[in-house]
């Protein structure tokens, strides 16, 4: 499909990519969302925590929300999405990945950009226990890669899944990692690495023979983390093998569900390979919007409703 024309034109302050990213990530506040937590036991003995919020009117429509790296179900981009959706006839289910709900998960493994088997278990749980005729998925950053990979690698997507929106998507994980390791993004990389190492030390208490102090000391960058932990815990050869197998870019040609990608041109987390113009052109189910501004999961909007929150609602409503 042709690219979606963007009309996003924020005030001058939010035309700075870093300010847009930081404001929406650290300073935005969303009130009025009532979430009810459900613990979902997984088939391998672990668990996921799901944060549900209900539509203001009875509905058979659900949006599953997937957060980004080191996020959770209470991040403003999740609760902001849930609030607008709830006000417009959709229930919302915010998925907290393994170890992201405030409690260390049970197993040595945790989560990463390609764990579509966990998303499958969430969807199966919804289909088996709820009564939704329409299910949509919205993912941010890592979660955006996750939903696109799920839709493109899966030949048996349930008929109830009607559409998806992916925001600020690192479609090529290696390209995105290289961007995060650049000097321009050093503060973000330090923050991510610090959070990941903190969690790794918590997990070390449970698995001291698998996570040593020596290993943790070797982690100087995000790629080191993927070499030393992510790849070992999830059966990849190394970080590059993980990036190659889990990047959603290779799965985009196979997507058969209407899916909208929104990647800002000024997103400092995304390299050139994260803008899949060719794949979108050749797949009638794919749509992509590349606004000039927005940063990474930024997209400030009036009345505390971000541009991508409104855009996702409009996209789902018109499917």
Image: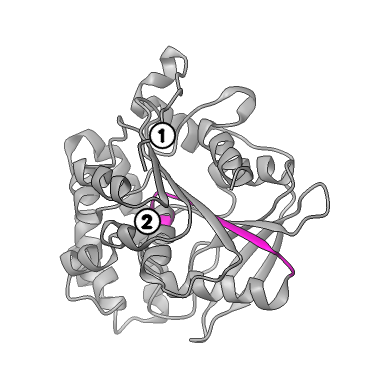
Quadrant of the rendered image containing residue 247? bottom left
For marks 1 and 2, give the CA distance.
19 Å
Mark earlier in primary sequence (1, 2): 1
Residue 214 location in percent, x, y?
20, 71
- Report the magenta residues as a range: 131-143
- Pick whichever, 134 or 186, lies toward us: 134
Residue in view at x 31 percent, y 76 percent: 234
Question: In percent of the image, x 18 and y 69: which residue is there?
Answer: 241
Q: Is residue 82 above or below residue 104?
A: above
Depth check: give the residue in front, 313 or 77.
313
At a point 20% along the width and 64% down the height, the residue shown is 244
Mark 1 or mark 2: which is in front?
1
The reply to whether the magenta stretch includes residue 168 is no
In this image, 234 relative to 67: left or right?
Answer: left
Q: Where residue 28 sits in the image (x, y, percent)?
A: 56, 32
Q: Is residue 12 visible?
A: yes
Q: Which residue is mark 2?
A: 145
> In the picture shown, does residue 119 fall above or below 248?
below
Q: How many marks?
A: 2
Q: Relative to 244, is 129 on the left or the right?
A: right
What mark, if any, has residue 4 been given in the picture?
Answer: 1
């Amino acid at each position: 499909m042709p690219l979606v024309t963007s009309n996003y034109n924020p005030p001058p302050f939010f035309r700075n990519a870093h300010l847009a990213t930081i404001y929406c990530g650290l300073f935005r506040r969303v009130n009025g969302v009532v979430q009810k937590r459900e613990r979902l036991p997984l088939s391998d003995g672990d668990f996921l925590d799901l944060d549900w919020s209900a539509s203001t009117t009875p509905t058979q429509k659900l949006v599953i929300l997937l957060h980004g790296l080191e996020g959770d179900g209470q991040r403003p981009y999740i609760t902001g999405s849930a609030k607008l959706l709830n006000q417009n006839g959709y229930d919302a289910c915010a998925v907290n990945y393994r170890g992201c709900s405030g409690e260390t998960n049970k197993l040595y493994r945790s989560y990463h950009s390609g764990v579509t088997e966990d998303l499958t278990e969430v969807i199966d749980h919804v289909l088996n226990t709820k009564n939704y005729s329409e299910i949509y998925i919205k993912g941010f950053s890592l979660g955006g890669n996750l939903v696109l990979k799920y839709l493109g690698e899966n030949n048996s997507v349930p008929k109830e899944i009607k559409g998806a929106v992916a925001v600020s998507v690192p479609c090529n994980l290696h390209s995105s990692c290289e961007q995060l390791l650049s000097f321009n993004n050093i503060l973000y990389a330090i923050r991510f690495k610090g959070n990941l190492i903190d969690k790794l030390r918590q997990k070390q208490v449970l698995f001291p023979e698998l996570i040593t102090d020596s290993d943790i000391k070797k982690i100087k960058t995000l790629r080191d983390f993927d070499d030393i932990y992510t790849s070992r815990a999830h059966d990849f050869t190394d970080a590059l093998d993980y990036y190659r197998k889990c990047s959603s870019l290779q799965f985009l040609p196979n997507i058969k569900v209407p899916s909208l990608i929104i990647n800002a041109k000024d997103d400092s987390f995304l390299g050139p390979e994260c803008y899949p113009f060719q794949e979108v052109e050749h797949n009638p189910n794919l749509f992509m919007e590349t606004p000039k501004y927005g940063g990474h999961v930024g997209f400030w909007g009036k009345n505390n409703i971000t541009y991508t929150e409104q855009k996702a609602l409009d996209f789902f409503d018109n499917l």
